[in-house]
Image: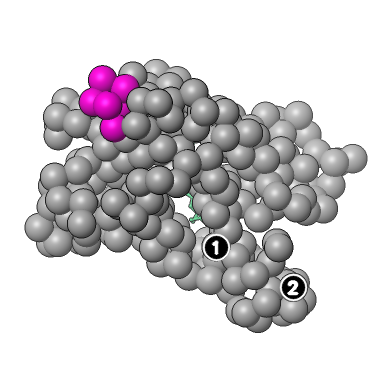
Amino acid sequence: MLKGKTAVVTGASRGIGRAIAAKLASEGANIVINYVNRREEADQLTQDIENLGVKVLAVQADVSIFNQAQNLITRAKEEFGSLDILVNNAGITRDGLLMRMSEEDYDRVMDVNLKGVFNCTRQAVPLMVKQKSGRIINITSVVGLVGNAGQTNYAASKAGIIGFTKSLAKEIGSRNITVNAIAPGFIETDMTSDLPEKVKELSKESIALKRFGKPENVADAVYFLASGMGEYITGQVISVDGGMAF
Ligand code: NAD
């Protein structure tokens, strides 16, 4: 149970972030949901989470902008008095072969996926150090472990998250703060819905379980790390990929 804990989930308005916010709330945590522009979806999620009997605050912030990420974390602390769990989930893709990739598409993916993790974590860590406890969970990807043609920018950002996670785990482990990453494989969300059917069928062949995962599968792993069950786990990358990269 996470009763009385405060969790911030970035990019929570839909997909995996939404499932994470709902799971942590169902386990009793008060939730700060971050959204960037889908206000209606954030309002709906706020309502759904309130119905679970916990407190919820929705904060608009583009995590790639330092001051906005700073405001997100500050608001969480002001509203609920502590910050126990940070889930860096916000992420985007701008796929394309390297020879055709624009500088803008490279930069945007790095700014949201990797710098966004820095921006939020930079603000959260001093609060967690003061509290002498905290859980940081970064959502990377199977692509950050094994690479994928057409995703050099995305893979670089996700591999960067893994280096960031391991380094920070070493830096702040003595402060009773764990830092881990979760590497999802193919999960059914907006991010994967656009893939052509043929690609989807082929992809399933490379998955031991022969099917895509659900956002809830990732949310369960986040809960595991955020709860007491995860207290002696840090610096790890946990794959939730149905058996893709092993
Ligand atoms: P999604 O596109 O459904 O959701 C992404 C979320 O991030 C959205 O809520 C979006 O508003 C938010 N976001 C985007 N830019 C933002 C910004 N600048 N600031 C704040 N929020 C921003 O995708 P998803 O599948 O739910 O992905 C969630 C995370 O899981 C991402 O980090 C993604 O890279 C990762 N992931 C997804 C899959 C998959 O198969 N779906 C696989 C591996 C990793």
17 in the magenta segment: no
Q: Is residue 175 above or below residue 7?
A: above
Q: Residue 126's x, y, as percent? A: 33, 19
SS assignment at label 1: strand
Q: State which quarter of the image contains the N terminus.
A: bottom left
Examine the rendered structure and indicate whether residue 94 appears above or below residue 1: above
Q: Earlier in the sequence, mark 2 or mark 1?
A: 2
User: Residue 243's quadrant in the figure?
Assistant: bottom right
Residue at the image point whose x is 35% and y is 46% from the top: 231
Identify which residue is drawn at 29% across, 51% down. 228
* Residue 65 appearing in the image: no
- Residue in the foreground of this view, choosing between 47 and 180: 180
- State the residue position of label 2: 206
Task: Give the residue type at disc 1.
Answer: Val
Q: Residue at x 57, y 34 (%)?
A: 166
The prevailing secondary structure element of the residues shown in magenta is helix
Q: Crowding near pointer 1: few (<14 within 10 Å), some, many (20+)?
A: many
Task: Please determine whether, in this image, residue 203 is positioned above or below residue 3.
Answer: below
Q: Which residue is mark 1?
A: 240
Looking at this view, is 195 or 81 the one in front?
81
Q: Is residue 116 left or right of residue 30?
A: right
Q: Is residue 172 visible?
A: yes
